[in-house]
Image: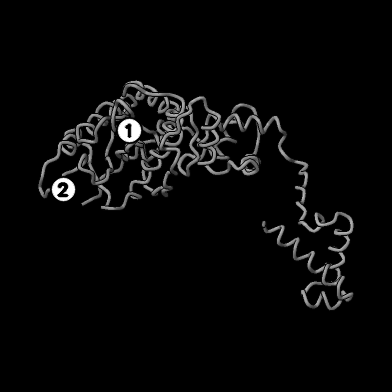
Amino acid sequence: MTKDERIANFKYSVLQHARENKNVTSTCKLFNITRTTYYAWLRRFSQLGYLGLLDRQRSKPSMPNKIRPDIELIIYNYIRDYPTHGPRRISNELKAQGITISETGIYNVLRRCGLNHRLDRLFYAQEHSDNPIITERYLREVEKKEEAHIKAYYPGYLLCQDTFYVGAIKGLGRIYQQAGIDAYSNFGFAKIYLNKKADSAIDFVKSKVLPVYSIFGIPLDRILTDNGKEYTTHWENGNHDYENFLASCSIRHTRIKPRCPKSNGMVERFNRTLLEEFYQIAMLKKVYTSLDELQNDLDQFIFYYNFKRTNQGYRLKGKIPYQKFLSGMRKYSLPEPR
């Protein structure tokens, strides 16, 4: 018996009690209800019988400013291709296509169809995808981490670097990503490897990071990493290949405090963006058989991230990373007088 049926049985027992005792007032006192409520139940019972005692579903009000069905269809089609985008991002991207919808309006559409949570949109995209395989990434939410407010005063002042485990691909094995992001402009870099050794960390800086800074004539002053074995040694007075390489390039190496990943929150947030906007979508649409194939698609997304995608963070406030990366002026200062 459902809850509605139990409530209907209670209402019927009240009406039956009043009929048998022929005293509405005493029945209302006994069951602690008002006479108005009693006669409302009696009127509905006389019109519809037992069905009239079941609670009626209230119809939803018709909102005059509700988004049209054809516009809702555009939103549904968009989240099929980009399920990890939120209402603000969807609003900005559709505005670039000439379709103006507020962030609140998009949220209301997503909430009405139960897609206001990222995980629900991922499953929605999976159900409408031609790929029948559900990957492990779609069965877990990415842990939300607050971005640490790192101060940077010009491009090249600080690069945040981190190792990120992408996952395991059949035929390739475990995939690791070396990622870096310029703390001033959010200009990002990423490269994938089959290990997380010091050689990978060095190759990433040598092949991906330094060439870009060199092309634009921007020196790199400092790199911030965690205390992983690919970045530093845990032996006192020990040498490490990664630290020796940075010293040879005149780049200062600093490390976060142990067990404090939020201290490097910028690159952690960058990893999350790559996971949500590239890896989860790419793995949904394509089966990769080589590392070069995945790296090629990753390079295309990094180009899109740096030169086309607007950034909603407090640093850029809607700008594209390359705009701030190229507009930042290096600040020089005279030495303090002795």
Which percent across, then down, holds residue 211?
Answer: 29, 25
Amino acid bearing label 1: Ala
Q: Which of the image's four quarters has the N terminus? A: bottom right
Residue 234 tag number: 2
Which percent across, then down, holds residue 114?
Answer: 60, 43
Picture quadrant of residue 11 = bottom right
Mark 1 neighbour class, 10 Å CA radius: few under 14, some 14 to 19, many 20 or more: few
**Residue at point 65% right, 36% down?**
101
- The residue positioned farthest toward the left in the image shown: 237
Q: Do the residues labelled 2 and 1 touch (CB within 8 Å)?
A: no
Is residue 33 visible in the rendered image? The answer is yes
Is 187 placed left or right of 23 in the picture?
left
Is 246 placed left or right of 161 in the picture?
left
Is residue 103 visible in the rendered image? The answer is no
Mark 2 neighbour class, 10 Å CA radius: few under 14, some 14 to 19, many 20 or more: few
- The residue positioned farthest toward the front in the image shown: 20
Which percent across, then down, holds residue 325?
Answer: 40, 33
- Most foreground residue, 161 or 219: 161
Amino acid bearing label 2: His
Give the secondary structure at mark 2: loop
**Residue at point 78% right, 42% down?**
64
**Residue at point 80% right, 59% down?**
53
Is 242 placed left or right of 85 in the picture?
left
Is 20 placed left or right of 212 in the picture?
right
Residue 168 tag number: 1
Picture quadrant of residue 207 = top left
Which percent across, then down, holds residue 105?
Answer: 66, 41
**Residue at point 17% right, 37% down?**
247
Mark before the other along the chain sequence, 2 or 1: 1
Residue 20 tag number: none
